[in-house]
Amino acid sequence: MTRSQKISYCAVFTALAMIFSYVEAILPINFGVPGMKLGLANLVIVAGLYYLNEKDVLIISVTRILLMGLLFGNGMSLIYSLTGGMLSYLIMILMKEKTNLSVLVISISGGITHNIGQLIAASLVVSNFHIFYYFPALLIAGTITGLLIGIVSERILKILKPNFF
């Protein structure tokens, strides 16, 4: 892949992740847990793990989080998203590279660790570790959303794999 093709793919993946984030931000879906979202942008990140190198996926993830935080969020949402996103990215990369686990398991791990990262950030920001009472709910939520994102990601990968690059 040439440098300009790589830049183009990264730009398209970033734009898709931002579109999914924006759609999710404007949808009035309440999952019962404050701040809980489906994580549609993670479709792009999970697919990117299988098509792009680690550095490119990291750039896409950080760029999406920073731009969405600056455009539609605030300082706190930016901190939470960045912490959750980076922990999730790290765990998914490690699991993909060091194990032979399925896309589904990697996605679920990403969903769970994203929530753990956000909990850690929140507990440090508010200096209150009682916030970890949310952990069971966020563990269930991360598992369900990771499962849904994983199922859709597997289907996307099956469709794109023969036709991509």
Image: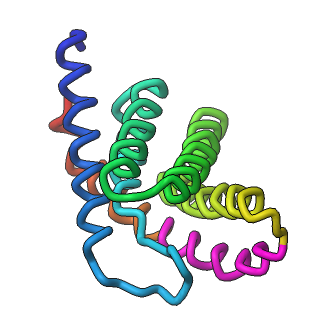
At x 27%, y 30%, the residue is: 10
Question: Is 126 located above or below residue 133 in the figure?
Answer: above
At x 34%, y 50%, the residue is: 68
Q: In which quarter of the image is residue 52?
A: top left
The answer, for residue 101, to whether it is visible in the render is no
Does the segment drawn in magenta span residue 31?
no
- The quadrant of the image that shows the N terminus is top left
Does the segment drawn in magenta span residue 131?
yes
Residue positioned most to the right: 129
Which secondary structure dominates the residues rendered in magenta? helix
Q: Quadrant of residue 45?
A: top left
Question: Is 3 located above or below residue 153 in the figure?
Answer: above
Left or right of 16 on screen, residue 139: right
Question: Is 141 located above or below residue 93 in the figure?
Answer: below
Q: Give the range drawn in magenta.
A: 130-146
- The quadrant of the image that shows the C terminus is top left
Q: Which colour scheme is used?
A: rainbow
At x 22%, y 55%, the residue is: 19
Q: Of residues 37 and 149, which is closer to you in this image?
A: 37
At x 15%, y 37%, the residue is: 163
Q: Where is residue 114 in the image (x, y as percent from the top left)?
A: 59, 57
Q: Where is residue 66 in the image (x, y as percent from the top left)?
A: 41, 42
Question: Is 130 located above or below residue 113 in the figure?
Answer: below
Q: Quadrant of residue 28?
A: bottom left
